[in-house]
Amino acid sequence: MKFLYVCLTYCYVIPAGMLALLLRPFGRRYDIERLGLNLPQLATKVRPVWLVASSVGEVTIALKVIERLKQAIEAPVILSATTPTGRARILQSAIQPDAVFFHPFDTTGNVRRTIEHFKPQMVILVETELWPTLMEASFERGIPIAQVSGRLSEKSHRRYRALRPYFAPLIRRCSLLLMQSDADADRLRDIAGETAPIEVVGSIKEDYMLPDSELLNQMKESLADWRDKIIFTCGSTRPDEEAILCDAFVRLKKSNSNLRMVIAPRHLERVKEIELILSTRGLSYRLWASTSQSQDVEVLLLDTIGKLNAVYHLSQIAFVGGTLAPIGGHNLLEPALAGCPVLHGPHYFGQLRGHELLHQFGMGFVVSDSAAVASTIEAIISSKDFQEEYRAKAIQLRNASSHILNEYVERLKSVMLHD
């Protein structure tokens, strides 16, 4: 099993590594970090705590942990991201780790160079970031590994189960595996066995994060012409979803002239594609990054990352993408914690805990097509006091989950003290 994993990894890493080296003279200087080269320097000799994230969702969780962890320990905290959007999300955040870098390709040389450069005292894996070579190299050097906000979907469970002889011993050697839900814990236990140090704490996505005040004020200025409008924000949208949402918006605006829409695609390279969808439906729009001045158009297309949470706080209704498309969903709780009722499609299998909480607190609505989106929004805004109603529910949701992040940090500190 290990031989198979190593072979498959090298099939990707060799060409990707060569590309990183070739692109460096052309401005892509950070890609070389994936080879354990040109890594940032720390200002202290104290061994850091290394958080391992992948893309925007995991990075957002990691940043919450880092903010609280830096208040609780006297050590640098560093963060790696796998994707360019994840790395960019870190750099645009008000919460800054002591070092930010691309995660190394999971082969022996790249991982060894990264570990020897930083000499971490602990590695923290966020959600399902299980990297076998990193785990083996850490254990060989006596570096404890913990997992936070652990999540294992049915699809990931099947994949890891097929490689159980390789992954199970590594997972069992972890110091702490803190999972989001009982279902996640059961799936991981099925792979690693009953002796694995698995505990259920909850999802860090349930912890409320107030956006940076400067960013929030910046977004308020950008949306000044929408101050008295009802803003419907569609976050982390995927292909085919924007067309459905725009069709719903066209239907709604006939009887709701004060309704406006924000579209924040999951991947920014799709902006041109979404512009075409808007144009073919005759919707006036502007891009945030290109025309940040206030304009009373019908749609704002958020062509930048790191702004979505602030926009949710200025919105009255939200839709979360990856749920009409069979992706499994993105963070359902973020707009709810900001005070928005949340629409989402039927494909929320990657966000089961979020779905459960939304419906427990009466803030979630499952929709399947443009007609359902339009009728659901009509029903929500028909109440004169709907904004106050959902803000009150959001406060209840925040209060119910306010302990989770503190519990994660306390459990991580216990591992550091023990080791």
Image (tube, grey):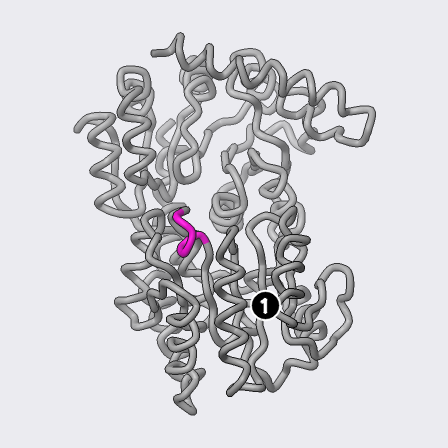
Q: In which quarter of the image is the C terminus?
A: top left
Q: Quadrant of residue 293?
A: bottom right
Residue drawn at x 26%, y 33% is 188
Query: What residue sits 63% from the left and 52% below the top?
Result: 93
Q: Name the residue under label 1.
A: 262
Q: Residue 408 or 181: which is nearer the viewer?
A: 181
* Along the viewing direction, whichever of 400 and 276 lies nearer the viewer: 276
How far from the left and from the top, in percent, is residue 166?
32, 16
Q: In this view, does 294 lie above or below 42?
A: below
Q: Please identify the residue farthest to the top as the structure is shown.
A: 3
Secondary structure, mark 1, is: strand
Q: Furthest-right residue in view?
A: 25
Please provide percent x and percent y for residue 97.
60, 42
294 inside magenta stretch: no
The one nearer the camera, 43 or 200, is: 200
Q: Is residue 186 left or right of residue 411?
A: left
* Tag 1: amino acid: Val
Q: Which residue is drawn at 49% across and 47% down?
A: 57
Q: Label 1: few (<14), some or many (≥20) within 10 Å?
A: many
Residue 165 occupies which quadrant of the picture? top left
What x and y, as percent, mark residue 368?
A: 36, 63
Residue 323, magenta (yes or no): yes
Relative to 234, residue 410 above or below? above
Q: Is residue 69 visible?
A: no
Looking at the image, residue 231 sits to the left or right of residue 133; the answer is: right
Q: What stretch is highlighted in magenta?
A: 322-326
Q: Residue furthest left?
A: 194
